[in-house]
Image (tube, helix red, strand yellow):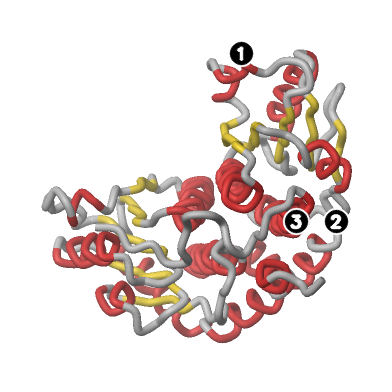
Amino acid sequence: MHPTHMAREVAEIPQAVARLLDGSALAISAAAAALRAADPDMIVTVARGSSDHAANYLKYAIELTTGIPVASIGPSVASVYGRKMRVGRAACIGISQSGRSPDIVEMMRASREGGALTLAVTNFADSPMALACAHCIPLGAGVENSVAATKTFVTSVVAGLQLLAEWQQDAALLSALRDLPKAMEGALMLDWSPLAARFVRAPQAFILGRGPAFAIACEAALKLKETCGLHAEAFSAAEVLHGPSAIVQAHFPVLVLAVEDAAAAGVAQTAARLAGQGADVFITGAAAKGAITLPSGPSTHPLLAPLLRGVAFYSFVEALARRRGFDPDTPPYLNKVTETV
């Protein structure tokens, strides 16, 4: 059987990240210098789908590093409702694989006209969104044929993290980013077969995380829906206890994405509690009573660990889709580029 487009693109992630860090270095440095000069009081993001999960990842990374609040703006506020946002002291980051969705383009244009520093993160440097912004960080990910975004999601997150590291002149994060492609090669080799054995016939699942790992949980839940026909919901490991855990009973499958950060102990406690309710719980990055621990690879910078979990998950979910009888390249009713207004 020939490898799927998704399998090839997942395997290419380490090389795509290396290309981004090399090929877009000058663009990232220029955008970081602009952020230092602007000294924004707030960051706003504009994105949809997997790109919005990348924006959510960066929200946590920026807030944890700088203390500057980050908020997501609904693109339809400008494109459908015609409302101009008061963003004069903000920086606005648009993330879009294609850079062509009219609603996102319109919001970035409106934000620039409103006085915000605008930055585009996109795979197409000549796209309408890129041209509407003051700065563009090209992903350089190459063609992505699979409908399910993988390498463009990862490179979008890495572009944002490299921007953050240079903006804040964070030596530890810059050093960890230089080693990231090699770490990703290791993540692609992790064996999550116990999780596959449980998810192969599962009709539903919860995916949990906190901080940047919650963004990966959201992305993982989306991928399970679109490639595997599995109804998965993502929750914060704290929020799941505020109601959703009521449906977690015997053999309910749960994947908990813990990483080695300040939230790890609390995330592990949530995993143990759900296992105590009878759930089939799988956890990364920690041990929890009653849960099966999945391999996570060596420790790395806390802001990069969740992304490595995401890379491992992509390799896992592509194989799972085929085991469940789906073609991960062609999810039903979906297109590669979705242009909304």
Q: Say which quarter of the image contains residue 214.
A: top right
Q: Name the secondary structure under disc 2.
A: loop
Residue type of the residue flagged with mark 1: Ala
Q: Position of residue 98 (x, y in %)?
A: 41, 72
Upstream in sequence: badge 3 or badge 1: 1
Q: Which residue is mark 1?
A: 246
Side (left or right) of 28 relative to 19: left
Spatial separation of the CA atoms under disc 3 and disc 1: 31 Å
Q: Say which quarter of the image contains residue 39.
A: bottom left
The quadrant the C terminus occupies is bottom left
Q: Which disc, if any, is residue 322?
A: 3
Spatial separation of the CA atoms under disc 2 and disc 3: 18 Å
> Image height check: is 118 above or below 252?
below
Residue type of the residue flagged with mark 3: Arg
Instruction: Tell me if mark 3 has few (under 14), some (14-19) or many (20+) residues whose alpha carbon lies within 10 angstroms of its own.
Output: some
> Image height check: is 89 above or below 251?
below
Going 80% across and 53% down the picture, which residue do you hit? 299
Going 28% across and 73% down the picture, which residue do you hit? 133
Q: Position of residue 191 (x, y in %)?
A: 88, 53
Residue 124 in sight:
yes
Instruction: Tell me if mark 2 has few (under 14), some (14-19) or many (20+) residues whose alpha carbon lies within 10 angstroms of its own.
Output: some
Q: Which disc, if any, is residue 169?
A: none
Q: Name the secondary structure under disc 1.
A: helix
Q: Position of residue 69 (x, y in %)?
A: 38, 45
Side (left or right) of 55 relative to 171: left
Residue type of the residue flagged with mark 2: Leu
Spatial separation of the CA atoms under disc 1 and disc 2: 32 Å
Q: Which residue is mark 2?
A: 190
Upstream in sequence: badge 1 or badge 2: 2
